[in-house]
Image (tube, rainbow, N blue to C red):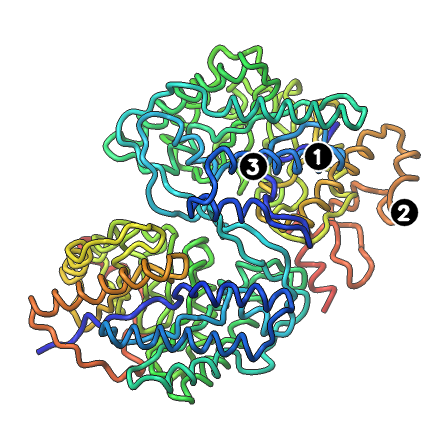
Amino acid sequence: MFATLVGAYPRTPLPGRPFRLRSAHARLERGEIDEPAFRAVQDELVREVMAEQLDAGLQLLTDGQVRWDDQQTAMAGGLRGFEITGLLRYFDTNTYFRQPRATEMPRWESPVTVADWQFARDTAAELARERGVEAPPVKQCLVGPYTLGRLSDAGDVGRERLVLALAEALNEELRALRAAGAPVVQLDENALTLIGPDEDAERRLAAEALRRVTRDLDDLHLCLSITMGDAAAVGADVLFEAPFRSYLFDLIAGPDNWELIARAPHERGIVCGVADARNTMPDDEPVMIWAAHYAASTQARGLDRVALAPSASLEYLPRDRAKAKIEALAEAARKAAITDPEELARQMDPRAVDIRSAALGRYAPPAGRPGAAEKTNPAAQAEARRGER
Amino acid sequence: MSNGLWTTSVGSFPKPPELIRARAEHAAGRLGDEELQALERRATEDWIRFQEEIGVDILVDGEMYRGDMATYFAEELAGFEIGGLVRSYGNRYYRKPIAVGEVRRTHPITLEAWTFAQSLTDRPVKGMLTGPYTIADWSFDEHYGSRRDFVLDLARAIHEEAMDLAAAGARFIQVDEPAASARMDELPLVAEAMAIVTDGLQAHAITHICYGDFMQAYPTMLDIPVDQVDLEMANSGYDLLERFREVPFTKAIGLGVVDVHSHRIETVDEAAAGIRRALEVLPPERVYVDPDCGLKTRTVEEAREKMRVVVEAARRVRAERGIGDALPDGGPTPGRSLGAPARGAEAGR
């Protein structure tokens, strides 16, 4: 039981601190500094956001993806066969990415993310040494082949061929990360949420892409992450046939993902995306703890195969709110790991001792305080709002 | 002779370096309100003069006094506080508002700036507002819990602002809804909110939508009760125009013909080709020509060059086709109430 990011973390500064990255970016564009000087500023920011994760209590770190404009161009730009074109909105956010366009069948030529992962690993080790604690593992996150293919302009290559070629290319990248020693690599397949219930061809394409991208990587911990909605239409068979060791699900934008968790084979790890990454409101600790316990109870999985995370990238939040979210997540994970119910009750808000009731909407928060149940249960949300008026 | 292909821009222009520095000084408390406003007015006047010089038909004030388009309104409305920075793309960030109470308009927001800009020119200056759906979507909500309640309260506030602008003489009022194309299932809410904003509005009402999945949003976007829909077209390769052959576009279009996120200055040939493509599916009197979006992310010189391309391209196609430039009155048009064609009316279906 631990807490981790989905991947990205705000690159903005905490209130009152200078925004060195933005200044450096502008100076780079004006030709006032060179690439190495700009990279040094990025390196320092990576160190800063990793220290923040470590100090908050997260136990599986990322570099916050603070070097990337977006996941799509970061990967497509490193492969052969793409050009980067106009801006597109990323799902339903107010965040944009430049759309890659396939100019030929894409090919992997050399590692795209290995150097950045190695830097993050070394940074984590250094930060841990300074604090006298054990070095935490660092996961590398990559956009998955289905999502990169679906969000790109396939051009003359055609989408099906593009997705499958990307699966082969990303398989090479995963091998490079494994060879470098990456303990956990996460594939972000948010576009699986776009597949509708009657889109069998898309389901088959996604299934084949997941098969190819994970081929012959049994000794690498691969995590499949799905945020921005629910992937229920893709189906448990597709998701769990692929040999991912763990799955991260957005349980705020995609509450139906609970159905998938309930069907996940017991040996698979589950990362519950329960802290709302799209709103500044503090999340209710009882719900986060309940989510962890519920995921642990499914298929007799056990708490040691469960973790907590934000519901999506934390880049949608201001830095101070993101920091508060990861601190709350780490604290919820710590408490969720307490197996003695009496000890857990002592450490929790006395109003939420019956945490299962809380999450099922039978927990009545004090007037004026948004309730735990409203976050995950639409019926409870409607009822709570009626009660407020 | 028909008239049409009127040139305009989407709203924002880049701030000159001295104004950027002044805004930073003002934010740090080292420059007073009056000194900042004087610089903003000088920059506004420069942009008005520039637009007149190159022959733009419908002018904008360039938004020298605004930062982010949603945050600017949230700062002036009751019920909001302003949160920390959030990235939108690349090295672009904005302060995302947080709704912490019931949203209300307590005073006119853009009226003074519009009045000042209009006093500088005889050509029409557009009133520029951010739409209720976009302000809500680009804010955090710690108060409402219901997106609809949040959006409709904002719609009432923006309606009051639009009515004030029209009463002051604004003939063209643009209500930007760039977020409208983000969630197809909420397009009806965008339309419901816009019906409140434009209710009884005696001006040519425009909405601007950009950087979304237009193919999915079309033709439902036509249900938004405005006279003109302004769309980013150059960035998306004018793909949507082909759909108009199957499902007719029922309103006037604002046709974006230069990409605002590229340093490259398009050629007049490229922009003119885009206009000609639009004329294959729309009559000239229902085509306005402009950049894809606000030009504030470009340098001053890039923005000027892109505007010159817009104007020159429209001028060239007008000459080719014998199209005049007499401006419309700027009142409501039949297109405002013409929504998406009934399914049976869709050509080819």
Question: Mark 3 belongs to which amino acid?
Answer: Gln
Residue A171: x %, y % from top left: 45, 18
- B82 is higher (above) or lower (below) than B47: above
Query: In the visual, does A240 lie left or right of B269?
Result: right
Question: Mark 2 belongs to which amino acid?
Answer: Pro
Residue at disc 1, secondary structure = helix
Q: Which residue is located at x 47 percent, y 82 percent? A: B111
Q: Chain of mark 2?
A: A
Between the C-alphas of marks 1 and 3, the distance is 14 Å
Judge by depth and name the residue closer to the eye, A38 or A139.
A38
- What residue is pinned by disc 2? A350
Q: Considering the image in quadrants, where does the N terminus of chain B appear?
A: bottom left
Q: On residue A51, which mark appears?
A: 1
Question: Mark 1 belongs to which amino acid?
Answer: Ala
Determine if marks 1 and 2 fall on one subunit: yes
Q: Is residue B215 visible?
A: yes
Between the C-alphas of marks 1 and 2, the distance is 32 Å
Residue B17: x %, y % from top left: 45, 63
Residue A66: x %, y % from top left: 55, 38
Between the C-alphas of marks 2 and 3, the distance is 44 Å
